[in-house]
Image (cartoon, grey):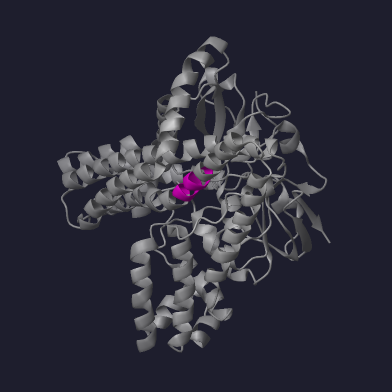
C-alpha cells in the first residue's frame, strides 16, 4: 500500500520485504535531506536500525523497541516498533525504571566516561596516516573507522534515548504542575551554558571580528564566499587570517551540510559555507553579545523554574519535580556536546577514509572519479579494494556499476518522495515521531492548503521578512532580523541562529535541533509545519507566533 506520491510516475515507492509492506512508514527528512548514496545507505541504515534496537533493549523500554529505518529510492522511512502485550510491558517495566534511575543518579560521571573514550579514539585518528598506506592497510583503516562509528552511535543513543524519555516524563510533570504550552515547557530547560556548539558559534563571531581587526572588512563584504579563500591567500593579512581559520577548522571542521551522508564534504574539506557565515558576521560588525545572551536565557529559566517550584506545595512533590528538571537539563546539555563527538567519529572520519579509498580505486581504473566511491555499497567497495590489491581482476565492472548508480541517484534527487507509505493513522500517538520529528499523522501530512501551523517549540512572537533557505550555502542571503524558513536544521546550521529573528521548519518537533537552538538564542520557533517552504513565498513579511505554533503571511 503506497501513499499518494508527488513524484515521477516511473518510480515505484514500495518496501522490499513483504512484512514491511504491512506496516506504515513516515518519511524521515530531518537527516535525509536528499536521497542517500549507496555507500551511506549500506552503512548507516543498518547502523541506525541496530543501534536503536541495541539501546532500546539495554534500556528495556516497556512499550516500544524503538523504530525501524528503511530506504526507498534513496529516501529514509521510519516505522515504530510498539510493544502491545500487557504481560511483556509489565515484565520490561522494572528493568526500565531501574535503568532510568541509574542513569539519572550521576549522569555527569557517565558523560565524562563516554567522552574520555571518544577523545582517545579521536587522538588515534589524528595520528593516523591515511595518505600513504598500502591498499590492505587502508582497508584496515576503513574497518577500524566502521568500528569507531558503531561505538560512537551507541554512545550517542545512550544520551539521546534517555534524554527523550526524561523529556517526556518532564513534559507530563510540567503539564500536571500547570504549564501547558510546549514553548513554555521548553524554557524551563533552556540555557545549557558553554557547550561545544556555543563555543563554535563564539569562535565564528571572533573570526569575523578578527577579519575587521586585520583590515579585511572590505575584502569580505565585496567578495563572494566561493572566491574568498583565493582572494585572502593573495595578501599577507589574509594569510594570517586563514591560519586562524585553519586552527578553527582543526577543532570544529568535522561537520557536514547534509548529516549522515558520506558524499557531503566537511567544513574542513570545503570551508565555503563557513566563509559565507563569517562574511555575513563581518557585514554586521563582527560583534554578538554572547555574555548577555547566556545571562538573559539563564535568568529567564531560573525565574520561570523557581516560580513553578514555589507553586508546588507538597515538599516531596517539589523535590521530585526539581530532580526531574535537573535531569532534563543535564541530558539536553549532554546531547548538545555529544554532537561534536558524534559528527566527527560516526560520520566525518568514515568519510575521510572512504575519500582515500576512492582516490586509490580511481587511480587503479576501478572508478571514473574518486567521488564515485560513494556509489558503491560498503561490501562492493571493500571487495574492489581487495581486487585492486590482488592485481588479478578486471576493475571495469565497478566503474560501470558506480556510473549507473550515480545516474539513478541524480534522478532520485529530482523527485518529491511521498510523505508516508502504508495505512498511516490519521493522528499519531508516538512520542518520538511527534516530539522529535514533528509528525502528527496522516491528516497533517495530507493537508494541501490552509494556514501554516505546527508545534510552538520556542516561545515569543516575531515579525520579519521570510527567507527560504535550502542549505548552508544560502546562509549569505539571510539579512539580520529575517525569519528563516527551511525544511529542517542540523548542527551545521547553528551559526545562522544568531542572525535571525525566528525559525519555521517543515519537519521537527520540540526536541529537535532547531527547537533546542532557538530556545538557546531566545527566538520564536514554529516547527513541523510540513508545508512552510511551499506555502510561504520568499521575501514575504510574516508573523511567527512561537507560543501558539502559527505563522501568518502579512
In the image: residue 331, left or right of residue 533:
left
Residue 64 sits inside the magenta stretch: no
Residue at position x 48%, y 50% in the image:
333
Question: What residue appears at the point 40 percent right and 42 percent down from the top-left corner?
Answer: 107
Q: As drawn, which residue projects farthest toward the top?
A: 87
User: Which residue is found at the position 53% from the left and 16% from the top?
Assistant: 89
Q: Position of residue 480 (x, y in %)?
A: 65, 72
Figure check: 460 above or below 103: below
- Quadrant holding the N terminus: top right
Instruction: Residue 497 in the image: state x and y as whole percent.
Output: 58, 63
Tell me where residue 369 sits by quadrant.
bottom left
In the rendered image, residue 332 lying in the magenta stretch gets the answer yes
Residue 302 appears left or right of 147: right
Which span is picked out in magenta? 328-335
**Residue 316 appears in which quarter of the rendering?**
top right
Where is residue 78? Give x, y as percent.
55, 32
Q: Quadrant of the C terminus?
A: bottom right
Q: Position of residue 449 (x, y in %)?
A: 81, 44
Total marks in image: 0
Examine the rendering and report whether any part of residue 306 can be seen: yes
Toward the viewer: 322 or 524?
322
Q: Main secondary structure of the magenta part?
A: helix
Res. 397 visible in picture: no
Say which residue appears at 51% left-offset and 71% top-offset: 276
Pick the front one: 15 or 475: 475
Q: Is residue 231 above or below residue 118?
A: below
Establish if 81 lies above or below 52.
Answer: above
Amino acid at each position: 500500500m503506497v501513499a499518494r506520491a508527488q513524484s515521477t510516475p516511473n518510480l515505484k515507492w514500495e518496501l522490499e520485504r513483504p512484512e514491511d509492506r504491512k506496516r506504515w512508514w513516515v518519511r524521515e527528512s530531518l537527516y535525509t535531506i536528499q536521497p542517500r548514496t549507496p555507500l551511506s545507505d549500506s552503512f548507516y541504515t543498518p547502523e541506525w536500525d541496530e543501534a536503536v534496537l541495541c539501546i532500546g533493549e539495554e534500556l528495556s523500554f516497556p512499550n516500544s523497541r524503538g523504530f525501524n529505518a528503511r530506504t526507498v529510492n534513496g529516501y529514509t522511512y521510519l516505522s515504530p516498533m510498539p510493544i502491545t502485550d500487557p504481560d511483556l510491558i509489565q515484565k520490561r517495566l522494572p528493568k526500565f525504571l531501574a535503568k532510568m534511575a541509574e542513569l539519572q543518579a550521576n549522569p555527569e560521571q557517565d558523560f565524562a566516561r563516554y567522552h574520555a573514550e571518544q577523545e582517545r579514539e579521536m587522538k588515534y585518528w589524528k595520528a593516523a596516516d591515511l595518505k600513504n598506506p598500502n591498499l590492505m592497510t587502508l582497508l584496515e583503516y576503513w574497518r577500524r573507522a566502521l568500528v569507531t562509528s558503531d561505538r560512537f552511535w551507541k554512545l550517542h543513543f545512550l544520551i539521546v534515548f534517555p534524554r527523550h524519555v526524561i523529556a517526556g516524563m518532564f513534559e507530563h510533570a510540567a503539564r500536571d504542575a500547570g504549564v501547558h504550552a510546549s514553548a513554555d515547557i521548553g524554557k524551563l530547560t533552556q540555557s545549557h551554558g558553554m557547550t561545544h556548539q556555543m563555543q563554535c558559534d563564539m569562535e565564528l563571531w571572533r573570526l569575523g571580528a578578527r577579519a575587521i581587526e586585520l583590515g579585511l572588512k572590505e575584502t569580505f563584504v565585496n567578495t563572494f564566499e566561493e572566491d574568498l579563500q583565493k582572494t585572502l591567500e593573495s595578501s599577507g593579512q589574509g594569510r594570517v587570517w586563514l591560519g586562524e581559520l585553519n586552527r578553527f577548522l582543526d577543532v570544529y571542521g568535522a561537520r557536514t551540510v547534509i548529516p549522515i551522508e558520506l558524499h557531503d564534504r566537511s567544513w574542513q574539506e570545503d570551508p565555503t559555507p563557513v566563509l559565507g557565515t563569517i562574511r555575513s558576521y563581518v557585514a554586521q560588525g563582527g560583534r554578538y553579545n554572547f555574555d548577555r545572551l547566556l545571562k538573559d536565557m539563564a535568568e529567564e529559566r531560573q525565574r520561570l523554574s523557581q516560580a513553578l517550584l514555589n507553586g508546588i506545595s507538597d515538599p516531596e512533590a517539589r523535590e521530585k519535580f526539581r530532580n526531574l528538571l535537573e535531569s532534563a537539563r543535564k541530558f539536553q546539555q549532554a546531547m548538545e556536546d555529544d554532537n561534536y563527538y558524534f559528527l566527527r567519529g560516526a560520520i566525518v572520519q568514515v568519510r575521510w577514509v572512504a575519500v582515500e579509498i576512492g582516490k586509490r580505486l580511481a587511480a587503479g581504473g576501478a572508478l571514473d572519479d574518486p567521488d564515485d566511491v560513494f556509489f558503491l555499497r560498503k561490501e562492493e567497495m571493500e571487495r574492489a579494494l581487495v581486487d585492486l590489491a590482488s592485481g588479478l581482476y578486471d576493475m571495469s565492472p565497478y566503474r560501470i556499476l558506480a556510473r549507473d548508480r550515480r545516474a539513478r541517484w541524480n534522478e532520485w534527487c529530482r523527485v518529491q518522495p511521498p510523505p508516508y507509505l502504508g495505512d498511516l493513522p490519521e493522528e499519531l500517538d508516538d512520542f518520538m515521531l511527534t516530539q522529535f520529528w514533528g509528525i502528527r499523522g496522516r491528516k497533517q501530512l495530507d493537508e494541501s492548503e490552509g494556514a501554516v501551523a505546527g508545534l510552538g517549540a520556542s516561545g515569543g512572537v516575531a515579525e520579519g521578512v521570510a527567507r527560504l533557505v535550502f542549505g548552508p550555502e544560502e546562509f549569505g542571503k539571510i539579512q539580520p532580523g529575517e525569519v528563516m524558513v527551511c525544511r529542517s536544521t542540523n548542527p551545521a546550521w547553528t551559526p545562522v541562529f544568531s542572525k535571525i529573528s525566528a525559525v519555521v521548519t517543515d519537519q521537527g518537533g520540540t526536541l529537535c535541533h532547531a527547537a533546542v537552538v532557538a530556545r538557546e538564542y531566545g527566538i520564536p520557533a514554529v516547527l513541523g509545519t510540513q508545508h512552510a517552504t511551499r506555502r510561504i513565498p520568499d521575501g514575504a513579511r510574516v508573523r511567527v507566533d512561537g507560543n501558539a505554533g502559527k505563522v501568518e503571511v502579512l
